[in-house]
């Protein structure tokens, strides 16, 4: 039964125990069990110092150990170990103790690498320590939002707020970052586990709620975030978030998929520096029919005698949407730093970006890709610069200039 633990945290806890010469129970670990035989353990009270642990560091006992009855420690005879068992409720109990191995036998400990080791390939390209302190709020962790969350965690972002009120259903699996093992789970909890698996150092807050029903909570989330990603599937939620982001002067990045994922929109709102989501909804986004992505959204659109079905769309068609949202988020989080990625600030200047996956529906008139550059084609991002005019309470839209990116 392997236990996955951060190496330095184990060393720190063992050092503390060695100094105090304690052999009684010392609850320093938080443990999560998986599949009944694998536990992920995290020491909760790290203390500085680094002695070398014994090789037989982990002892697994079939029954609870009476730690108070253990013999006093004899010099050099009782190495420090993690002792693990299940209590009467079936929960994992792990203690750091100085005790003989007992007759339970010893097992290897598998260590989770540290933050610097995980992100070693980012060195010289991105300042992961800076991202570690940044907080990203993601509203909607469905197919697009879950991918954004995972990619940001893999980039080194250290703090997340995940907001969604749905469970993972079978029709989600073909496009969602989570798989069939998470069926029936709340999306926020399933995605949280994915993030911790990719970036064990990150902190994830989960909010299982409908943003339209809890606007005061949404306001607190927006206020505490450095950047907001909006991947919800209805305009009512986007407009509420838009209003709060303007109020709190927080940048927001919105992602939308068109009918049958034939095309994509990314909208970046920089409060009071350009148009807001409401402005764009009334102008450049007007008439661009969105994808019906699930039964709940279909119910909202259905007529009494004509049910609306969730539309087909490939996961591959959604990936450009999530990846550009992540790019824009990282660019904002790296503002004021020296990074090779900062050169993109000169490229990613638009307020609205659109992408066509194929020449159907709303993109029927596009020319075949070939080597065309002068006219819009499929499989390319196009940025739209919007000149502000007074058409909205707080923001503006205007004539557009199209720029391929």
Image (cartoon, rainbow, N blue to C red):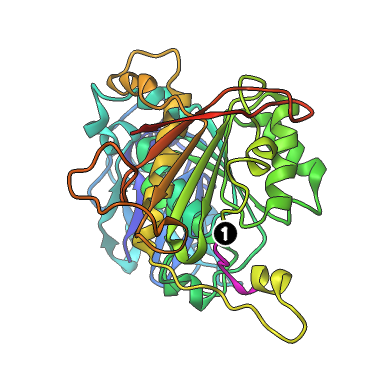
What are the residue bounds of the magenta stretch?
A: 290-295
Q: Nearer the viewer, residue 99 or 308?
A: 308
Q: Quadrant of the N terminus?
A: bottom left
Q: Nearer the viewer, residue 327 or 307?
A: 307
Residue 238: give x, y in percent of width and height: 68, 46
Q: Quadrant of residue 296?
A: bottom right
Residue 326: give x, y in percent of width and height: 43, 39
Mark 1 surroundings: few (<14), some (14-19) or many (≥20) residues within 10 A: some
Q: Quadrant of the C terminus?
A: top left
Q: Per the image, is 322 magenta?
A: no
Q: Quadrant of residue 308?
A: bottom right
Q: Secondary structure at mark 1?
A: loop
Residue 331: give x, y in percent of width and height: 42, 26
Residue 360 lies, with reference to residue 281, above or below; the image says below
Q: Seen in the image, is 261 located left or right of residue 167? A: left
Asked whether residue 176 appears in the rendered view, the answer is no
Residue 218: give x, y in percent of width and height: 74, 42
Residue drawn where x is 58% and y is 59% of the image: 289
Of all residues shown, which one is farthest toward the bottom? 305
**Which residue lies under the disc numbered 1?**
290
Residue 308 lies, with reference to residue 345, above or below; the image says below
Residue drawn where x is 72% and y is 44% of the image: 239
Q: Nearer the viewer, residue 7 or 173?
A: 173
Q: Main secondary structure of the magenta part?
A: loop
Asked whether residue 134 appears in the rendered view, the answer is yes
Count every numbered label the image shows and give the total: 1
Residue drawn where x is 40% and y is 71% of the image: 174
Q: Quadrant of residue 230?
A: top right
């Amino acid at each position: 039964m392997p236990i996955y633990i951060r190496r330095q945290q184990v060393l720190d806890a063992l050092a503390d125990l060695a100094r105090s010469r304690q052999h009684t129970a010392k609850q320093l670990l938080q443990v999560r069990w998986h599949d009944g035989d694998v536990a992920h353990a995290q020491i909760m009270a790290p203390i500085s110092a680094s002695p070398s642990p014994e090789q037989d560091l982990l002892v697994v006992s079939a029954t609870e150990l009476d730690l108070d009855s253990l013999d006093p420690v004899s010099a050099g005879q009782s190495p420090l170990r993690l002792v693990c068992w299940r209590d009467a409720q079936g929960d994992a109990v792990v203690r750091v103790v100085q005790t003989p191995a007992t007759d339970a036998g010893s097992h290897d400990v598998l260590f989770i690498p540290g933050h610097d080791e995980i992100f070693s390939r980012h060195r010289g390209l991105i300042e992961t320590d800076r991202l570690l302190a940044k907080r990203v709020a993601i509203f909607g962790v469905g197919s697009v939002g879950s991918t954004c969350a995972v990619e940001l965690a893999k980039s080194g972002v250290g703090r997340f707020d995940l907001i969604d009120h749905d469970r993972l259903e079978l029709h989600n699996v073909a496009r969602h970052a989570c798989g069939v093992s998470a069926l029936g789970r709340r999306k926020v909890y399933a995605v949280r586990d994915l993030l911790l698996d990719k970036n064990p150092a990150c902190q994830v807050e989960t909010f299982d709620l409908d943003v339209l029903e809890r606007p005061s909570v949404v306001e607190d989330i927006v206020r505490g975030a450095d950047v907001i990603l909006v991947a919800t599937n209805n305009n009512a939620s986007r407009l509420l978030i838009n209003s709060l982001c303007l109020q709190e002067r927080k940048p927001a990045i919105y992602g939308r998929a068109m009918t049958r994922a034939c095309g994509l929109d990314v909208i970046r709102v920089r409060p009071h520096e350009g148009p807001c989501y409401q402005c764009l909804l009334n102008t450049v986004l007007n008439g661009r029919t969105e994808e019906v992505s699930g039964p709940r959204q279909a119910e909202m659109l259905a007529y009494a005698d004509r049910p609306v079905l969730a539309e087909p769309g490939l996961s591959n068609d959604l990936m450009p949407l999530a990846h550009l949202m992540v790019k824009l988020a990282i660019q904002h989080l790296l503002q004021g730093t020296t990074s090779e990625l900062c050169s993109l600030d000169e490229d990613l200047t638009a307020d609205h970006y659109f992408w066509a996956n194929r020449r159907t529906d709303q993109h029927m008139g596009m020319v075949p890709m070939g080597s065309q550059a002068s006219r819009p084609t499929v499989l390319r991002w196009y940025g739209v610069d919007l000149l502000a005019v007074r058409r909205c309470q707080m923001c503006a839209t205007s004539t557009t200039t199209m720029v391929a990116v």
